[in-house]
Image (spheres, rainbow, N blue to C red):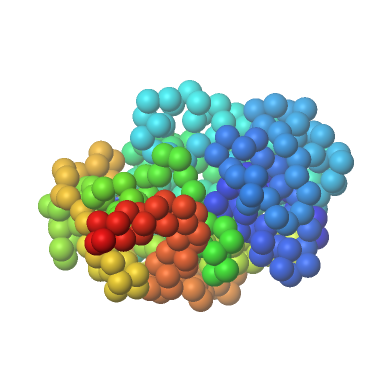
Amino acid sequence: MRVLVVGGAGYIGSHVCRALAARGDEPIVFDNFCSGHRHAVKWGELVEGDIRNPADIARALSVHSPDAVMHFAANIEVGSGETQPLDFWDNNVGGVINLLKEMQAANCRTLVFSSTCATYGIPETVPMTEDEPQAPINVYGRTKLAVETMLSDLARCGHIDYAALRYFNACGASPDGDIGEEHDPETHLIPNALKAAAGLGGKMKLFGTDYPTRDGTCIRDYIHVVDLADVHLRALDHLIAGRGSFACNVGTGDGFTVREVLDAIARVTGRPVPFEEHPRRAGDPPVLSANTARAKSLLGFEPQHSSIDEIVADAWRFHQKVWAAELAELANQEQMEIA
Ligand code: UDP
């Protein structure tokens, strides 16, 4: 199968390209490199373009005639959505409208879409099923929900087949340390905590210690990016087999507090995470975890790599590579101080 991977140079998109290529499918990366990385384009051809420019999408579709599209290219940093809402609506919704129009013109009707548990907002019940009311509390979640609504309308009219995968907390890296999480600015817990553990960048800020959870810090459902990539392949196969459009949670069903993640990092890396406690970060729900029954029954998906220790070990291996120069310099300084 030939699959146009929109945002294929990004964190999750590049792992999906890797997984597609590993089973003999042909990914074609479409990316504007606003946050993706050229060094993450290792599988399949590259089309450099922007979803806000319909001609770029038309070119990619006409040159490569893909069997399906997977869409990852989106503004994801929740805080920026609150200050730059129009950018989010333009890229996350306007960009998808362009993509869908060009797909229709090219007679390509299969789309796997990156959605998010942020479409639920603050859940009434955890673990959350897909029937949890979708009431997002930020611009990011609202743009993703808008696309889900649009996709469901198009599917109902028989124009497309789609999967909306509602990710929980994507993390980890490829086990060979080749590709991983590299956001700028980095806002996610595990890379920030690893950086602090490595002695780079000072203490990690721990946001919120007064949540109604077992140790006062937020609980999240952390899923390894390799497992996440596997779900995309399963979703694609489901759609291509004509088994119908769907939305589904992608998580593990387990939840860890921030303090438990920090403990795992200390255990796996042998380095405690220096941190300081801060007030709650705006918009963080206390607990998010997935009811995973639908992913299992519909796609046969069960996470294989998402133990917290495996997640941390893979992320640590990757980041040690990325930070090799800084770590070497730090080791030098320590040597000099000892001498
Ligand atoms: N968090 C933290 N310090 C950081 C980054 C995150 O304490 O530097 C907390 C955050 O408040 C939340 C959890 O870690 O409770 C997971 O946050 P992350 O940004 O990784 O994912 P989110 O669930 O917001 O998508």
> Is 158 displayed left or right of 74 in the figure?
right
Residue 22 seen? yes
Q: Residue furthest front?
A: 339
The residue lying toward the viewer, choosing from 200 and 80, is 200
> Is 23 displayed left or right of 187 in the figure?
right
Position of 61 relative to 69 (above/below)? above
Residue at horizontal 71 percent and vertical 47 percent from the top: 29
Residue 298 seen? no
Position of 80 relative to 38 (above/below)? above
Position of 327 relative to 74 (above/below)? below
Q: Position of residue 277 (x, y in %)?
A: 15, 49
Q: Quadrant of residue 119?
A: top left
Q: Position of residue 204 (x, y in %)?
A: 26, 50
Residue at horizontal 28 percent and vertical 41 percent from the top: 283
The residue lying toward the viewer, choosing from 334 and 93, is 334
The quadrant in which the C terminus is found is: bottom left
Q: Position of residue 220 (x, y in %)?
A: 33, 59
The residue lying toward the viewer, choosing from 49 and 138, is 49
Q: Quadrant of residue 50?
A: top right
> Is 217 displayed left or right of 121 in the figure?
left
Position of 113 relative to 288 (above/below)? above
Residue at horizontal 55 percent and vertical 51 percent from the top: 11
Residue at horizontal 31 percent and vertical 61 percent from the top: 335
> Is 219 displayed left or right of 34 in the figure?
left
Q: Residue furthest left?
A: 210
The quadrant in which the N terminus is found is: bottom right
Q: Position of residue 247 (x, y in %)?
A: 54, 55
Q: How many marks?
A: 0
